[in-house]
Amino acid sequence: MARRSIAMLLACAAATAPLADANAADTHKGEGARSCFYSKDISSWSEVDSRTVNLRVSLHDYYQLKLLTDCPDVNWTQAIGLESRGRDWICSGADVTLIIPHPQSGPPRCPASEMRKLSREEVAALPARQKP
């Protein structure tokens, strides 16, 4: 099924982001600036290939994660986890690692290298199986 829910969301940071992080994220929302999202706002995901994952954040935002290497089992798993580095705000690929639960061998960790917000046009052009 193309739509998958985030069944496991891992975060290294505290449950609430510091005020400084919230203010920093707001500054990234301007035209041409990086776009950030709160890790707990991820509602679903879909794989594009073994190195690319699309995320749905809140109701209307979509992001694409590019992974450093192939991530085993990303094409069949029903759940993923995201581990943020040091804070709950995710503003770049360097801020997050994708984790695939695997009951027998432990979860593979797949660090991201890039992250970008998809435009409305890009989201509309996604094949149904790639749209979270």
Image (cartoon, grey):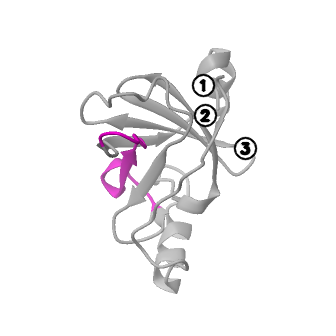
Sort mark 1 into few (<14), some (14-19) or many (20+) by Cα contacts within 10 Å: few
**Furthest-left residue in view?**
69
Please report whichever mark, 2 or 3, sits nearer to the chain's N-terminal start. Answer: 3
Residue at the limit of the structure toward the bottom, as seen here: 19
Q: Identify the residue shown where x is 53% and y is 59%.
A: 39
Disc on the earlier residue, 3 or 1: 3
Label 3 amino acid?
A: His
Say if residue 126 shows up in the picture: no
Q: In this figure, which residue is indicated by the disc labeled 3? A: 60
Q: Compared to 116, does 90 lie above or below?
A: below
| Residue 65 in picture, x, y percent from top left | 42, 38
Instruction: Please report the bounds of the magenta region as a residue range.
Output: 90-105
Considering the numbered disc 2 on the image, is that residue within a helix, a strand or a loop? Answer: loop
Q: Answer whether labels 3 and 1 touch (C-beta < 8 Å).
A: no
Which structural element holds mark 1?
helix
Residue 104 part of the magenta segment: yes
Percent from the top left, x then y, of residue 12? 39, 69
Residue toward you, 107 or 131: 107
Q: Name the residue under label 2.
A: 119
| Badge 3 element | loop
